[in-house]
Image (cartoon, helix red, strand yellow):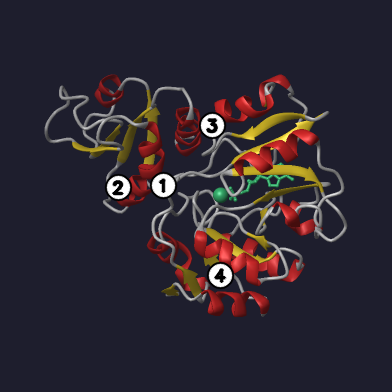
Amino acid sequence: MAELGTDIDKAADLLRNDEIVAIPTETVYGLAGNGLKSDTIEKIYMVKNRPASNPLILHIASINYLDGLVTEIPETAIKLAEKFWPGALTLVLPKNDKVPDIATAGLKTVAVRVPAHELTLRLLSMLDFPLAAPSANLSNRVSPTTAEHVNFQIGKSIQYILDGGQCSKGIESTIVGFVDEIPIILRHGALSIDKIKQVVGKVLTKKDHTTIVAPGMSPKHYSPKTLLIACDNIQLTIAGLKGLHIAVLTLCPDSHKELDENIFKVSLTSKGDLSEAAYNLYEKLFLIDKMNFDCIVVEYVPDVGIGISINDRLRRASN
Ligand code: AMP
Ligand code: MG
């Protein structure tokens, strides 16, 4: 298993020696390596068993390093970066020649963000290269929000996990590309579309622009090993699953009192707050997944704000 600790000098040394290290961010833990070296990036793909067609996000210490990776930055991208970095916003921009093709799965664009986690920001400021870091889970599985989750999934394949506690946001960043300067949401995430609209006004989604390239967005992703069914009506869904050993994940503890008391119930929040639900989502899925139920039934949350991103993950986890 990997060593867990908060030694950023050790993490920096390993990274300078082309090793890969798990790092905390406010969204989920990342599996990081030198983002300018193809061989190191290849190790990340191997450990995760990630398809080569799914590009990575490059993490930088501040907006000042963006220029060194891209050829063009729309005015709207600068506005968003200035408002939300460090934070859960990833910008997809045309890459320059320094960024290896393997980091972008051969695309001409690169995904970049400044993570809002004190340990990782200090680590990044010690390095003279960006960190390529996809989520530190096995491909398609539940993303890790604690160092222990990382250790459980990929601890055998890495030396060191920088332990920054539980991720404060709990789901991945919101990924934004640009069509003629207009932001387009490529993946819903921890930063809500409403907040982005407040800064730039018009925002497109993939529905508005069906030809846009959005790799790694396969319908199946983020799945526990246990079969997961996301639904709008828990009672009806359970009625069709007689004889199975079921766990139910609800938004609030007091909802669904009608359910048989033998059914194992877990709630995502104490009172229904959607940010709290995002914070707890992967943690609860991870815990229930270890309990050997036949099936996990989850109810969709209200489709507003961060709820849009939670429902996206539930849909893909249940595919
Ligand atoms: P992960 O860090 O595991 O959430 O994965 C990063 C995600 O960023 C990928 O699955 C892609 O969906 C997205 N991404 C990375 N690079 C690009 C790019 N150049 N264009 C569009 N999306 C990208
Ligand atoms: Mg991921």
Is residue 192 rendered to the left or right of residue 98? left
N-terminal of the two: label 1 or label 3?
Answer: 3
Q: CA distance from mark 2 to mark 3?
A: 27 Å
Q: Which mark is residue 256?
A: none
**Circle 4 SS class:** strand
Label 1 sits on residue: 224
Amino acid carrying label 4: it is Val
Q: Mark 1 and 3 residues: CB-CB less than 8 Å, in contact?
A: no
Q: Whole-percent x and y of residue 267? A: 26, 36
Amino acid carrying label 2: it is Ile
Label 2 sits on residue: 288
**Which residue is more in the foreground, 133 or 137?**
133
N-terminal of the two: label 2 or label 4?
Answer: 4
Quadrant where the N terminus is found in the figure = bottom left
Label 3 crowd (10 A; few <14 / some 14-19 / many >=20):
some
Label 4 sits on residue: 21
